[in-house]
Image (spheres, grey):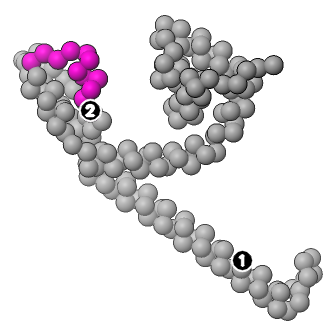
Amino acid sequence: MEKELTSREKLFCYHYLMLGNAKEAAIAAGFPIRNAHTQAAKLLSRGKIREFLNAQYDSLAKRKVDLIISGLERLAFGGINDAVTLAFSDEINGDRIGELDLFNVSEIKRPKSGGIEIKFFDRQRALERLLEIQSEISQNSSADSFFAALYNSAQLSSDKRGVADGDKV
């Protein structure tokens, strides 16, 4: 009989559902990089892991839209202070880089001529995409409301006429 999942195994499952890549999920969950691929394969072969993934799939799939919106908001409204700090630092160690919020950075280059070039994601495109998503959500919501009202109206109408289920109208 398989044991229950540890918190690290659950974390692996959440990352796997979000990333779609088993090795990256294993690394994100804290498994050693050198054997992350092997560890991920072992985890995915376990029945309890597969059951947990199936149970969580629907709820996490719905949350992906929220994560996309959140990411677009960070791109559209996020600060660039940490990127500027990086650009003006002569030397910066790996620990310090890990602390910087570089979410808005799309590319960093150190040209041979010296200095540093930093390119940011397009804020305008992020705003436009946010507007599109919000519009799609609102249209779907309106359509759902319309069809629910139509269905309820049909139910009330058939009840008033005494139509039984299965009878032709």
Which type of secondary structure does the marked residue at label 1 adopt? Answer: helix
- Name the amino acid, label 1: Tyr
Q: Is residue 24 left or right of residue 89?
A: right
Q: Residue furthest bottom?
A: 161
Give the x, y percent position of residue 169. 87, 86
28 vs 160: above or below: above
Residue highlighted by disc 1 = 151
Residue at 47%, 23% (x, y): give it.
Answer: 28
Specify the label residue 102 is tagged with: 2
Residue 94 colored in magenta in the image: yes
The answer to which image quadrant residue 132 occupies is bottom left
Q: Is residue 157 left or right of residue 23?
A: right
**Along the viewing direction, whichever of 31 and 22 lies nearer the viewer:** 31
Give the x, y percent position of residue 53. 66, 33
Residue at 51%, 68% (x, y): give it.
Answer: 139
Residue 41 colored in magenta in the image: no
Asked if the residue under mark 1 is in contact with the one under mark 2, i.e. CB atoms within 8 Å, the reply is no
Give the x, y percent position of residue 41. 63, 16
